Image (cartoon, coloured by chain):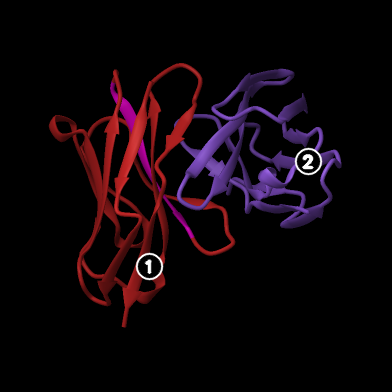
Amino acid sequence: DVKVTQSSRYLVKRTGEKVFLECVQDMDHENMFWYRQDPGLGLRLIYFSYDVKMKEKGDIPEGYSVSREKKERFSLILESASTNQTSMYLCASSATATAFFGQGTRLTVV
Amino acid sequence: AQSVTQLGSHVSVSEGALVLLRCNYSSSVPPYLFWYVQYPNQGLQLLLKYTTGATLVKGINGFEAEFKKSETSFHLTKPSAHMSDAAEYFCAVRLEGGYQKVTFGTGTKLQVIP
């Protein structure tokens, strides 16, 4: 089975902190994604990557950056966390049509 | 560009009743279509997908969906609801070819009443 692992299930950070969310997949997938999920808004794409060191902005990239130095790892970075970034963050990977998701990281910014 | 509309943010059914969750999409080219399920505090799990071929697609846990191009719909059904089906369901669309950007609907929470 494909496994997508997010480093933390729950995080609490302070406003202004730099936050790293890590995601690792074990199936050699080319494509990786970061979404945030908010009630009533569904999943919104923040960034995606289709190859090592390649990245593309999604629908809501403001306030975020990403890093993909190795094929299996895709990191989401909040340069200066703000309270409006409190959300559930979901990582996914895919090779073909189907995206496989991690368990999610619930981030609270206080 | 593609988009997805899920009608009804909350749906309640009785145990044993038919489940029908509605999804309409817009896409300028033939799409790939997906239904995912999310249990509380979990990630998303693929229920079923349509890429090409047969328009009636069967998935896990007794769910199925039918791709109707003329109606731009991909509704999810299950003949008989079970308590364990209570979850949030997301419809998603991806364009064939190109980078695999997937667009999700806003989700439908299914409540199953005993």
Helix, strand or loop at mark 1: helix
CA–CA distance between discs 2 and 1?
36 Å
Left or right of residue B68: residue A30: right
Numbered mark located on residue A50 in the image: none
At horizontal 47% and vertical 45% (from top left) the residue drawn is A41
Q: Amino acid at mark 1?
A: Asp
User: Main SS of the magenta segment?
Assistant: strand
Image coordinates of residue B14 in percent, x first then y, are 25, 76
Q: Residues within 10 Å of mark 1 (few under 14, many from 20)?
A: some
> In this orientation, which residue lies closer to the viewer: B97 or B5?
B5
Dot 2 and dot 1 within a common chain: no
Image coordinates of residue B27 in percent, x first then y, are 30, 24
In the rendered image, the vertical position of residue B86 relative to residue A67, given as above or below: below
Residue that numbered label 1 is attached to: B85
Chain B appears what colour? red
At horizontal 72% and vertical 33% (from top left) the residue drawn is A72
Left or right of residue B88: residue B26: left
In the rendered image, the vertical position of residue B40 relative to residue B94, given as above or below: below
> In this orientation, which residue lies closer to the viewer: B50 or B17?
B17
Residue at the left extreme, as displayed: B70
Q: Which residues are magenta?
A: B30-38
Chain letter for the purple colouring in the rendering: A
Tell me the subunit letter for badge 1.
B
> In this orientation, which residue lies closer to the viewer: A49 or A106?
A106
At horizontal 64% and vertical 37% (from top left) the residue drawn is A27
Tell me the subunit letter for badge 2.
A
Residue that numbered label 2 is attached to: A81
Residue at the bottom extreme, as displayed: B114
Q: Amino acid at mark 2?
A: Ala
